[in-house]
Image (cartoon, rainbow, N blue to C red):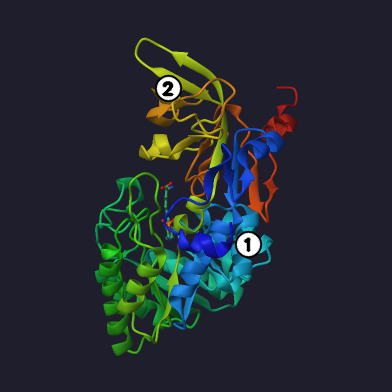
Amino acid sequence: MSEASVVAAAGLHPDCAYRAGRLCLDGVELAAVAAAHGTPCYVYSRANIAARWHAYDAAFGDRPHRVCYAVKANDNLAVIRLLGRFGAGFDIVSGGELARVLATGARAADVVFSGVGKSVAEIERALAAGVGCLNVESLDELERIAAAAVRLGVVARVAVRVNPDIDAGTHPYISTGLKENKFGVPIGNALALYRRIAADAALHAAGIACHIGSQLTSFAPVIDAVREVVGLAGALAEVGIALEHVDVGGGLGIHYRDEQPPPIGEFVRAVLQAVPEHYTVVMEPGRSLVGEAGVLLTRVEYVKDTPAKRFVIVDAAMNDLLRPTLYEAWHEVRPCAEPAADAETLPCDVVGPICETGDWLARGRELAVAPGDLLAVLGSGAYGFAMASNYNARPRPPEVLIEDGGARLVRARERVEDLMRNELDLLGDL
Ligand code: LLP
């Protein structure tokens, strides 16, 4: 699929469609990917990521801006490098993410460091590398940053992340802008932090930040938050603290089931209208750049009929894709071989091999499947592999990037030996 045609389809699933009865991603047969790399396996569409990126970038026009990809959504090095090549900056939340971003050759100056619990070591590493901005979430953190900057002999560029106490209207686990959430500084306390910054030669007030939540299907709450933040930036300018940028966070949702999130361009334009032109606008999208670009391939091991239910037991599990059980999230499941129009479907739960009742990928679906069938779990590009674990000593799946009509392995399947590496030598004579 050309990048242009994906742009036209932005807001829908990527070109994950049947061709001659075979489910393909960007024209590449998913069954062939599974044959080459096994299952479970994450597969991402480069063209879809590119289209999403260009939708963001184009919408900003000539307004000064930086789109900082939220690496937590999918921290595969190939995805980071790709977005870096397109011109993205990066939003990180840990020293590990900083290392990943720098390993791809990105510039530290294009990084914003978010997060409520930065350690001294992480702050020092970020300052030594020269990150573009640390988004500060408390006075104590600011003091840590100031002390570290003095030790290292650098000036720390900071922004205060404000908690505007606005309901983002999303799942409570991923809502971050309410006063009862752990994030940010209450807006009423922000001025005091900026005065502290202005009084310290080791600190520079580069901007102001907010982020109210994820998987947002309406941008109205973001705009309300941005207005609050811009109002505060104006008040700061009046007392001589002139900020360069306004960081509006990420959060734009994607289409999993029946959500209708606004198109990227509409969202960006609404933000631009709410921010005066002399500020650089920083945005931190994660899910909306990579979420719809990915599928998780999994094979049916067993079909188990019980008096109560039919269970389709597959080889992917909650350790591979946690979102369904953690957030009761819906991911569409499609057989990779197109079922005949008259195939008899039966209601079933798609579950994994893990020893927990919560180990499910989809519940109450109508599917016609048999053991050995290959399934694709859609919308798995964001917070899929990134949240995978080794629970039940399960090696994490490989990751494959579809580009130019081919499938490129971008992360090898973990091996059981990898999981034991840090323990075997310590066993000694135990
Ligand atoms: N900026 C900050 C400060 C954030 O905390 C986040 C996400 C983002 C940007 C990116 O948000 P996005 O554009 O991806 O919505 N694991 C959850 C999502 C957690 C989001 C956490 N913060 C999920 O699977 O739905």
Please report the residue visible at 55 percent of the width from the left and 39 percent of the height from the top. 296
- The alpha-carbon separation of the residues under discs 2 and 1 comes to 42 Å
Quadrant in which the N terminus appears? bottom right
Q: Nearer the viewer, residue 346 or 218?
A: 346
Most foreground residue, 374 or 189? 374
Q: What residue type is labelled 1?
A: Leu
Name the residue located 29 percent from the left edge and 89 percent from the top edge.
238
Q: Quadrant of residue 37?
A: top right
Q: Residue 82 carries which label?
A: 1
Point out the frontmost of discs 2 and 1: 2
Is 181 positioned to the left or the right of 76 in the image?
A: left
The spot of residue 99 in percent (x, y) is 63, 59
The answer to whether mark 2 is within 8 Å of ligand 1 is no
Q: In this view, does 267 lie to the left or right of 76?
A: left
- Res. 196 in view: yes
Disc sitting over residue 155 in the figure: none
In the foreground, 264 or 248 = 264
> Please, is residue 380 above or below residue 211 in the view?
above
Which amino acid type is marked by label 2?
Answer: Glu
Taking the image as four quarters, which one is ligand 1 found in? bottom left
Q: Which mark is residue 344?
A: 2
Question: Dot 1, how many residues are within 10 Å of its Cα: few (below 14), some (14-19), or many (20+)?
Answer: some
